[in-house]
Image (cartoon, rainbow, N blue to C red):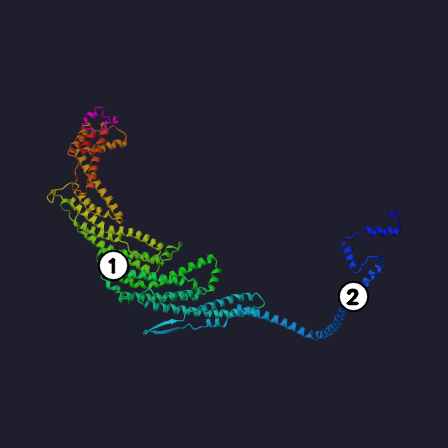
Amino acid sequence: MSSGTLAPGLARKVKKVLDTRLDGRETVACLKALSEFYVENDQSARRGLRTAIEKRGLSINNEFIHASESTQGTLKAVDDKLDALTQCVDSIEDALEKKSQSTVALLRETESAKNDLLRAQSRTKVIDSFLRDYQLKESELNALKEDIDETTEIVDGVSTSSSRVITPLFYKALRRVKQIHKNCAHLLRTQHQRSGLELMDVMSGHMDQAHEKLCRWVQREVRIAAENEFDKSSIFSADAEERLQHVGKALRVLRSRPTLHQYCVEEIARTRHNALFRHFIAALTRGGQSGKAPIEARAHDPVRYISDMLGWIHQAVANEREVCNALFLSIDTSLLSEEEDEHDEHNTPGTNDKTDANMEEISKDTMVKIMDGLSRPLRVRVEQALAGTPDALEIYKIMGVLHFYSGVLEQLLSLPTASSSEAEKGAAGGLVEAVKMCANAAHTSFNDDAIVKGAAITRNPPVPQTGLQAPPIVQERLDVAISILKAASTDVPLSGNLSGEEQSGIHEHKDVDADKIIVKVLDAIVDPVVEACELGANKLREVNSTIIGGSKTVPWAADAYVLNCMGALHMPLKQYPLAQAKTQDLTRRISNTATDIADNHAESILSECGLLDVLERVSLYQERSSGVMSHDPSLTLDIISKALQGLVESAKDGAPDFQEVQSPRVRLDIQNRFSNRLIEAYTRVYIAVLNPNAGFGSTARDHIKHAPDALSTIFGM
């Protein structure tokens, strides 16, 4: 049957059934559930299918209701408990509401107490900050008031003085006082000006007391240090180093109080001045406690005696320089307080340089004052030694030692500033001036001795001996000069306490002084000898006899004698560089004397043959450049040719050998000078005669027998 014949409603149902998918999950589940109770598939069962399904659903619902009865009972019990819990919560809320109303006042009081506690804590911090910045601790006050008076101890039967060491806590407390005083300046810029002024006054009192106590301690300490140091066996005390460091630190703190610092500096100079004077006298008279002999035990040897005194003084200067540098210049950084570090940080580089220069000047000035105590005893003993020293060599050695040590001490005691004037450079102190005065006294003594001996030689000049050799007095004074040159060439050993720059300056000073002194010394020794030889030569010229010692004299004998004397002095002195000035002077004088010998003898030969007058007339015509020589009656060809021939005849035997002159070199120079002078005179006249302007004509050459070459051949030139 087709769908077109079915009723519309039935057709829809059929279509719905046919469109239903049997493989769907819901459909399969429904069919599976249906198969559990739908067993028989007959007509009656199909008719009652709806009813069976409804019954099945009703049965399932009844089972669900029965199964949920226990759950509903449980839920009811829970609901009852929730109602009871709600009632408890309501009661608690009511109780809390009542309690909160009663504790509001307590909470207000608690908040107020908390605010009061915060205010108290803030005030505590302010008070702590105030106490830290404006008040001293009890320990700091005790440190400032600590007793540092001098005490006396007896060790091995000997009483020794000592004082308590200034502890680091004292410097720390003093730094706190200065910092508080500085902080008070901030209070003056606020409404607390009165408090600031009162605190500043209190801190100023603490600072004054602390600095005065520190000043007294420094003065006692340097006095004790001087006594303990100079009472020991050596001038150098190793155990004084720590004491000097503490004193130097105290002096560095006292720089902020110039007056107190100056008191301490003056006490250092006075104490060490007196102690060093006593120690020097002890070294002179008693010697050292280590067994050293007294310096005056060597007074019989003036050179060593004075050298030992100056060496002791030099060592003392080096020691005092170390002491003064330790006190004023070099401070151990481990001992510096925080105050000093802050002070150095706030100083500008220019301020630091100025302070360092000022401290260096104070150190030098203090050292000069300390060493002044040795001036008078040294000067007295040097003058006594010079008065008893007749030997010139010893006097010169003493003079050299004094000049050397004057340069050394001036280098150590003078202020090394590039801008210092001559007056400032001379402010090295009485010790250097005393040594210079002693050196001048030695120089004067040497000059007096040289003048006396020179005057004795010139009063009785040595008589020239046979052979015209130098007299014994020349060798005697030469030995004195050589011994002095050897002494001058010996360097005085320098102390190892000097720096390289100071040693270089001393060497330069020594070289300049040595050159100046040796020139004067050699002049004082050599010049009187040469003068005496010249006086002896004058006596030889005055002798009218032609026989001296059995031999005939020659015209140049007196000059040869002087040459031999100067040559005896010149050759030995030439070996010493320090005598260069004197050897140059002798060389010049020897050369002039040799020239005089050659020229005088040449003029004598020219005069004998008549050529000297001819040469003078020829020179006169040549200078005037006017007139004709041939017209001069004194310049005829006969006169000229005779004079030239006479010179050749006189020269046939050759030049004189000048054997009286002992030096071969000087003798050869005289011979060459003599020959050249004669050849020059002959040549000038010869050329003048042959000159057409002379008016002698072309036959003038025939009248002259020899050319100038002939004279050169005779002399071997």
Camera-nearest label, 1 or 2: 2
Count of numbered labels shown in the rendering:
2
Q: Could you tell me residue 9's position as x and y percent?
A: 88, 52
Q: Amino acid at mark 1?
A: Val
Range drawn in magenta: 688-708
| Residue at the spot of label 2 | 63
User: Residue at (83%, 52%) from the top-left corner?
Assistant: 16
> What element does badge 1 sit on?
helix
Q: Residues within 10 Å of mark 2 (few under 14, many from 20)?
A: few
Tell me the residue that label 1 is attached to: 303
Residue 147 figure quarter: bottom left
Query: Residue 664 placed where, x, y %?
Result: 19, 41
Quarter of the image with the C terminus is top left
Q: How many residues crowd mark 1 within 10 Å: few (<14), some (14–19), many (20+)?
A: many
At label 2, which amino acid type do we have? Glu
Q: Horizontally, is 3 left or right of 623 in the view?
A: right
Which residue is more in the foreground, 38 or 409? 38
Residue at disc 2, secondary structure: helix
State which tag comes first along the sequence, 1 or 2: 2
| 371 relative to 695, above or below | below
64 or 458: nearer the eye? 64
Q: Quadrant of residue 322?
A: bottom left
User: Which residue is depicted at the point 16% across and 48% down?
Assistant: 471
Q: CA distance from mark 1 to mark 2?
A: 149 Å
- Furthest residue in direction left, as rendered: 550
Q: Is residue 661 left or right of residue 56?
A: left
Left or right? Give the position of 9 relative to 571: right
Q: Position of residue 98 (x, y in %)?
A: 72, 75
Tell me, yes or no, if residue 328 can be seen here. yes
**Is 107 in the magenta?**
no
* Looking at the image, residue 566 lies above or below residue 256: above
